[in-house]
Structures are given as structure tokens and as C-alpha cells.
Amino acid sequence: MAKFVLAGKADCPLYAQAERLADTLQRTLPSFKVHKIPVLPSEWERWLELTCNKNGWKHEESPLIWRELVEQGGKGMILGGYNDFVDHCQVYYGVTSKIPDDELETIVAENLETQLSLIAEEQHRLSLIHPCNVWITGALCLTSQILIPFLLSDEAFPDVQTVALHLLHLSGDEEDMQTLKLDTEDLALGLLYRVTVHTDLEQAFHEAHVVILLDDFNADSENESDEARKQRVKNLSERYREYGRLIDGRADKEVKVIVSGMSFVNMRCSLLVESAPSINSHQFVAIASQLVNEVRAVLADKLCVMPSDVKDVIVWGNISGRFVIDLRWAKVFNYPGAIRVPPSFSQPVLRVLYDRKWLETEFKPLVHQQRQILLSNTGREAAISATNGILQVLKAWHGAYGPDKFFSVGITCTDFYSLPHDIIISAPVTWTEGKWSLLKGVTVEGKMLEELDLCANELQQEKETQLQDPV
């Protein structure tokens, strides 16, 4: 089968003549097929350059005509321009065509009008689409790559028709970014509207509805000097201040901002809040799920159950520093006690965990070790756990959970327990109608409040330290 492709300027008379000749052959020859590509005059030169570069051709005028070998596969074989096409049709098919001037003018006008109409229709269709703009920073990290397919699902955005995904990685390799873009497009997920990649802040956070920040701090080596480490902390802080300013000036005022990672999580979130004064601080949260999961894993090992059997653990304080573990609400399922209970039956953790000395002396060090084991064994962040935490928060923000479901997340500290108002602190919250609120009925007093005060002091010191010169 012969399939010819005719491309040319929509107002080109030679393109119109080639089109007429191809139509004649297509009507009379069953094996002759033609595909037409009319291009607006203003876009022709750019289109021609890209097409020729892609196929390794040389051609400088309208029209451009080539043959696609449908049955043999492979790229097309260029014929050339109008005269080359006429010669080919005369030699192989014994057919030629000459259009009267008045008819030619009509065809040219119809081609141009049709093309302009199609473009106007497409622009109108696109104007009716209002995608949810989701920005991810640190887009080349493992967490981002695991997260992306889940973001493009109804589960994460149940009320969204389309998602425009914007991937930002400062100083990222352009080839790696383009590969990530192609991989994301190849997912062919229905919710995806488009993917854009960025390696600078020129377009960052424009009309953003959701911003997920994954830029983290990881030591370059074990031998890194204190001065070098302080400088990198300062650089990270400046980056987050700039992020905050851009979010404040460019993002949608109802934007949801999520900070995730292993280091300085509270501080990074706090810098965003301070640098975005026009956006409600309740729209910024820091993910504590990795820490909560590490607590659950240590408890599960002690109680001889699966980590998934341990529920409702609360973590207060500094997600990546000093924290307080609150087990007053925690419960365990499938506990192998003296009496066999059904899988749906739960028991309070503090009731079945008799070893109080272990809780007071070994428990928290084991939680710290849990994270260090992961880092030393893999050399990377807890990407799967981080992904799950981000998705849980997004789903909660979009009403996927009832009022009894609570999460430990880093939130702006306002009007509770006499703690400083200018810090982000992990606390248990519930979500109702897209708004979080502190878990009702939970109190902090006595020794726990003293420990929480120490957490707050540490967070303030982190902020003060990163404001100082590194040397």
C-alpha cells in the first residue's frame, strides 16, 4: 500500500494543487492513501525545520511530500516538493492535474479558513479545561518517582478532572528531566493533562494548587566538615525562603503545601510559612509518617505482631530531631496473648506492653536506630514510606477519611500548650471539609509537656542557627 503525506502552508497554491492531485489518485486507486498536514503560514518555517531535523531531510519550500512505507515499517521516504510529486504520479500512475486559477484560489482560501477554524476550536476546548496544577520539587529523587503514578489517580484527587504535573529539580540534568517527563507521559494515565519539567525558578509555582517539596539535606560524605555542613544548611534554608516567596506571589491562594524528607522537615516548612505571609499557615504541613512508621515497627517487634497491626501512634515535636512518643491512643490488633481474640478486636498498647522499663530506657533509642539502619543499608530516604504519608495527607485534605481518623503531621503551632507561635511542630490532627484541626480530647501535661517544651526549644535553635553565618 502506498501512503503519501502532504504537508504545506495552508495558503500555498502548490500545496492546494498537490492536494487536488492526491485526491484524484485516492478516488481512483484503492491502494493509494494520502494524509494531509496543512500548517499555518506563521508556523511553517518552524514546523519544517523540526520535521526535517527529526528525519534527517533537507527541504526549504512548501509543500513537503514524503511516502510512508506502511507494510515495511521504518521512517518515511522523502519525495520533495510539488514538482517531484507531479513527476512521480505521472511516471508511476500516468496521472497529472492542472487546476484553473479561480478554483485554485477557492481551495487555498478553504484550506486557510479550515485550519484557522480547527485551531480556534482547539483553543476553545483547552480554555474549558482547568487542570489541578501540581508542583514537585526535588523531582529526580526516588520518592518523586514512586509518588508520580499515585498522584495521577482518582484516589489522590477524587474531585479533579485533570492534573498538570510540573516537575522541578534545581540544577537537575536536562537529559534526566526529559527522561522523567517521557516516563511519566508513557504511563498514559487518564488524569494526566500535561507534564512540564524545570531546572530553574523562572516559572516555578505559577497558579499552583498543590506543592510537594522533596528537596532534602543529606551529608555529602561522612568526612564533611562542620563549616561545609553549616553552609549547606544555610543554602537549603535560602532555597526554601525563595520557594516561600514564589509560592506567596504566584500560587493559588488556596494552595496546599506539603514538605517531606528526612532532615530539617519542621524548619523547612516553617521557612515557607514565614516567607508566604499572604497564604494561610494552615495550608502548610510537614509529613511525619516515616517517624510514625518507625515507632510502629519497633512496637510491633516488641509485641510480636506486624507493623500494620499497630495503630494510632502519636508523635509530637521535631520530626527529624527531638520528639515525644504518645501511646495513650495506640492500639494493637492480633496480639498473641493468653486469650485468642478475633482479628477485628484491638487492645490498648499500654495495657499489653508490661515492660515499662523498656519503654522508658530502650524504646526511643531503638526508634532512632530504625532510621539509621535504613540510611546505612540503603543510603537513601525512606521513599515508600514518604510516598504513603504524602498520599494519606492529600486524601485527608480531599475528604477521604472520617472525623475519627487522625494523623501526626507538622503544623503551625498556634494557641496550644503555651508553645512558641513561630514554629512548625508535629501534632495529631483530623481533617474535616478540607481543614485540619487538633485532635479533640488529647491533652499534654506534666512530663510530656516538659519534653515538648524541649522539642520546641530545639526547633527555635535550628531556626536561629541557620540564620547565622556558617563560619
Image: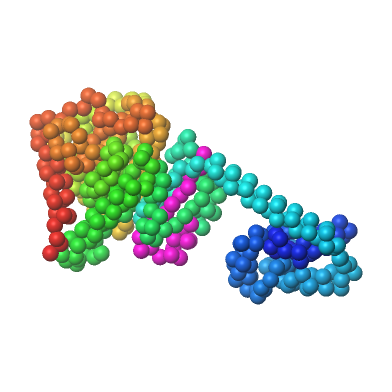
> Between residues 227 and 114, which one lies in front from this camera angle?
114
Give left or right: position of 110 versus 241. right
Give left or right: position of 467 versus 347. left
> Between residues 450 and 204, which one lies in front from this camera angle?
204
- Which residue corresponds to the image point at 79% horizontal and 72% vertical from the top-left? 83
**Which quadrant does the N terminus fall into?**
bottom right
Question: How did the renderer colour the structure?
Answer: rainbow
> Between residues 103 and 71, which one lies in front from this camera angle?
103
- Which residue corresponds to the image point at 84% horizontal and 69% vertical from the top-left? 89
State whether residue 103 appears in this view.
Answer: yes
Chain part drawn in magenta: 161-181
- Which residue corresponds to the image point at 46% horizontal and 49% vertical from the top-left? 165
**From the viewer's perspective, is residue 84 above or below residue 374?**
below
Give left or right: position of 333 versus 367. right
Quadrant of the image occupied by residue 167: bottom left
**Is residue 169 inside the magenta stretch?**
yes
State whether residue 20 appears in this view.
Answer: no
Give left or right: position of 105 versus 337. right
Q: From this viewpoint, which residue is outermost toward the bottom? A: 58
User: Where does residue 458 sit, x and y in percent of width and height?
Assistant: 13, 46
User: Where does residue 168 sit, x and y in percent of width and height?
Assistant: 39, 56
**From the viewer's perspective, is residue 393 above or below residue 66?**
above
Quadrant of the image occupied by residue 358: top left
- Which residue corresponds to the image point at 60% horizontal and 69% vertical from the top-left? 49
The image shows a total of numbered marks equal to 0
**Which quadrant does the C terminus fall into?**
bottom left
